[in-house]
Image (spheres, coloured by chain):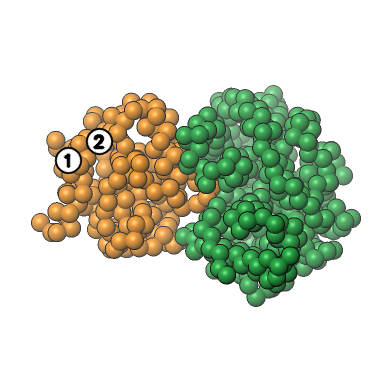
């Protein structure tokens, strides 16, 4: 094939950084194919230096407005690990619940706002008001549900206030549990409708065998907040403290986000990786939905990350309901509430140490690593976010996908490339803006 | 009276009524904070309800529908390629599609839902931002225009 294709997808975003797709095919041969991340470095690790571990989660939460709770939880886990503090079972339960809410919120927004327009044949979410009014209203309703539950639990729907090192400053009372449970029980109908919608959507057929990395556990629970090890579908088994040997971050000239690789040229993290690693541990209802949607692990189709996210939504909703019912049955011990200001006076003993937080957040495994002095001050910090682990995988997918679709029009190729990037739900700002497309011959 | 003040009176002239003001924006993103800035300076009254939705306007849709309003004015930072601080009033059909984040629901969607459920007239008052980078302070031009918008709203809808 002697086709020439040159795709430059550029977008100067206003907020969360930006990325460009560059594809250059000459005489049917792929000469260039890369995902450029040109977002400015944000130096959060530098900001953490010389700050107290007790405020670290409030700082790192600002890394992201979408997975603020995930950063909060990874930060708290790293800080508590560094000082050797073991949280109570009640605290762990509430943290798991918080993580489920963020997973739900983030996944639903990705499914409805970023992916659904492509699959429903419109340019963005906005035209769906006319063509799919019920879908728009359902998306708004579900987003509000997630926001409201987070608001009740941690004081705000983004950048949680009450989740801190040691536990929670405010614990839910019975009326809070009742309210959250009522919201989530009502959400089941909308979740069922979302699954029905997903059954009508056709995702691109694609396959690239790669490695999937995430938390693994010997227990029965689908590991999100904590796991026994970090594992992969290639048999990698490592302690979270060895995360640098897993991520093997390296720098490429066209990206301000580092690339990562483990046993192969790249690996993927996120919902698809988690399902490929831990499918059997999903809630039975989530497994039933997976069956209805025709999803079977191991899936090597990155486009199905969106399907994996929906399956996880069902899991997170059902697990959340289960946690609330358990808390209602056994009660919440209000005496465990942490009083800010007392922490530094011995309630939570501080000592020097090194800690690692490894948490499965919506886009994949997130690592926070802090070195803390004997006063509880952070000396060094390192954060490895899921999107930077996925950037290399996106690029490798693009290199496989482009030669397979050269018979398509430029418009179709461009859309497929955008959809591929969107499937990963990257936290660069933002895949929807890849819609500004220029072809250059 | 300054030209800018005259201009803002003129810009708001087509607005025949207003019983709900919905402000939007993130106070930690420089000029994007103009929505909360304006809301802080306006008090709700019997005739006018002021709601600051911050970064999540979808959270207040039900509250607004419950008010059964006749005329809703949405205020937010905008980018229409003018000088910072320039104020424009547009109807709901011309509300910009884009929002600050892909994970934030567009104001155009919010406006469409409000229009469908309340039958209210919906207008969008945009103020040209200079910067929406991380930062707690607004530029002088945007702050000045925001204060003048507050004055004009008070003149038009508080003392009518």
Dividing the image into 4 quarters, which one contains the N terminus of chain A? Answer: bottom right
Q: Is residue A194 left or right of residue B70?
A: right
- Neighbor class of circle 1 (other Cα within 10 Å; few <14, some 14-19, many 20+) is some
Residue shown at 52% from the left, 47% from the top? A123
Q: Quadrant of residue A240?
A: bottom right
Q: Badge 2 is on which residue?
A: B18
Q: What percent of the width, then of the height, locates residue A113?
A: 55, 43
Q: Residue furthest left?
A: B1
Q: Which chain is orange?
A: B
Question: Tag 2, which secondary structure?
Answer: loop
Does the residue at mark 2 contact the one at mark 1 (Cβ under 8 Å)? Answer: yes
In this view, the residue in front, A56 or A271, is: A271
Dividing the image into 4 quarters, which one contains the C terminus of chain A? Answer: bottom right
- Position above or below: A129 against A26: above
Residue B37 can be seen in this image: no
- Neighbor class of circle 2 (other Cα within 10 Å; few <14, some 14-19, many 20+) is many
Q: What percent of the width, then of the height, locates residue A375?
A: 63, 64
Residue shown at 21% from the left, 49% from the top? B11
Q: Badge 1 is on which residue?
A: B156
Q: Which mark is residue A170?
A: none
Q: Quadrant of residue A6?
A: bottom right
Q: Which chain is green?
A: A
Chain of the residue on which disc 1 is drawn:
B
Q: What percent of the width, then of the height, locates residue B19?
A: 26, 33
Q: Residue furthest right?
A: A235
Sequence-earlier tag: 2 or 1: 2
């Amino acid at each position: 094939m002697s086709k020439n294709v040159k795709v430059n997808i550029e977008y100067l975003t206003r907020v969360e950084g930006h990325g460009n797709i560059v594809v250059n095919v000459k005489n049917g041969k792929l000469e260039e194919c890369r995902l450029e991340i040109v977002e400015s470095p944000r130096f959060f690790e530098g900001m953490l230096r010389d700050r107290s571990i007790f405020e670290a989660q409030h700082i790192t939460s600002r890394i992201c407005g979408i997975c603020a709770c995930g950063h909060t939880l990874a930060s708290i886990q790293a800080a508590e690990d560094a000082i050797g503090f073991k949280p109570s079972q009640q605290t762990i339960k509430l943290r798991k619940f918080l993580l489920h809410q963020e997973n739900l919120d983030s996944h639903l927004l990705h499914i409805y706002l970023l992916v659904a327009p492509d699959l429903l044949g419109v340019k963005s979410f906005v035209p769906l008001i006319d063509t799919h009014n019920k879908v728009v209203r359902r998306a708004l309703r579900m987003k509000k549900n997630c926001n409201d539950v987070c608001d009740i639990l941690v004081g705000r729907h983004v950048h949680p206030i009450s989740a801190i090192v040691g536990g929670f400053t405010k614990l839910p009372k019975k009326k809070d549990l009742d309210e959250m449970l009522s919201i989530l029980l009502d959400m089941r109908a909308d979740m069922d409708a979302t699954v029905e919608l997903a059954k009508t959507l056709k995702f691109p057929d694609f396959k690239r065998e790669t490695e999937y990395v995430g938390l693994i556990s010997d227990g029965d629970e689908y590991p999100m907040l904590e796991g026994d090890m970090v594992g992969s579908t290639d048999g990698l088994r490592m302690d979270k403290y060895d995360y640098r040997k897993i991520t093997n971050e390296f720098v490429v000239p066209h990206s301000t986000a580092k690339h990562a690789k483990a046993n192969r040229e790249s690996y993927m993290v996120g919902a698809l990786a988690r399902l490929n690693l831990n499918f059997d541990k999903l809630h039975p209802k989530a497994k039933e939905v997976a069956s209805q949607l025709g999803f079977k692990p191991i899936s090597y189709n990155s486009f199905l990350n969106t399907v994996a996210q929906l399956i996880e939504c069902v899991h997170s909703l059902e697990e959340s309901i289960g946690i609330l019912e358990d808390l209602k049955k056994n009660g919440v011990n209000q005496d465990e509430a942490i009083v800010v200001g007392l922490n530094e006076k011995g309630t939570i003993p501080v000592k020097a140490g090194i800690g690692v937080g490894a948490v499965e957040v919506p886009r994949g495994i997130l690592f926070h690593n802090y070195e803390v002095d004997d006063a509880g001050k952070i000396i060094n910090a390192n954060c490895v976010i899921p999107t930077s682990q996925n950037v290399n995988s996106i690029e490798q997918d693009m290199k496989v996908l482009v030669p397979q679709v050269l018979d398509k029009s430029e418009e179709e190729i461009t859309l497929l490339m955008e959809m591929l990037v969107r499937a990963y739900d990257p936290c660069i700002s933002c895949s929807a803006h890849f819609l500004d497309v220029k072809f250059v011959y | 009276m300054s030209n800018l003040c005259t201009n803002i009176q003129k810009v708001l002239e087509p607005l025949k009524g207003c019983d709900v003001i919905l402000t939007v924006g993130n106070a930690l993103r420089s000029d994007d904070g103009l929505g909360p800035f304006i809301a802080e300076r306006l008090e709700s009254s019997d005739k006018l309800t002021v709601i600051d939705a911050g970064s999540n306007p979808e959270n207040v849709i039900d509250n607004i529908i419950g008010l059964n309003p006749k005329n809703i004015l949405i205020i937010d930072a905008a980018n229409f390629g003018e000088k910072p601080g320039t104020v424009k009033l547009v109807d709901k059909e011309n509300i910009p599609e884009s929002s600050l984040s892909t994970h934030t629901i567009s104001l155009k969607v919010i406006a469409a839902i409000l229009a469908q459920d309340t039958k209210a007239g919906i207008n969008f008052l945009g103020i040209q931002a200079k910067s929406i980078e991380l930062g707690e302070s607004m530029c002088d031009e945007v702050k000045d225009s925001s204060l003048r918008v507050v004055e004009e709203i008070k003149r038009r809808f508080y003392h009518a």
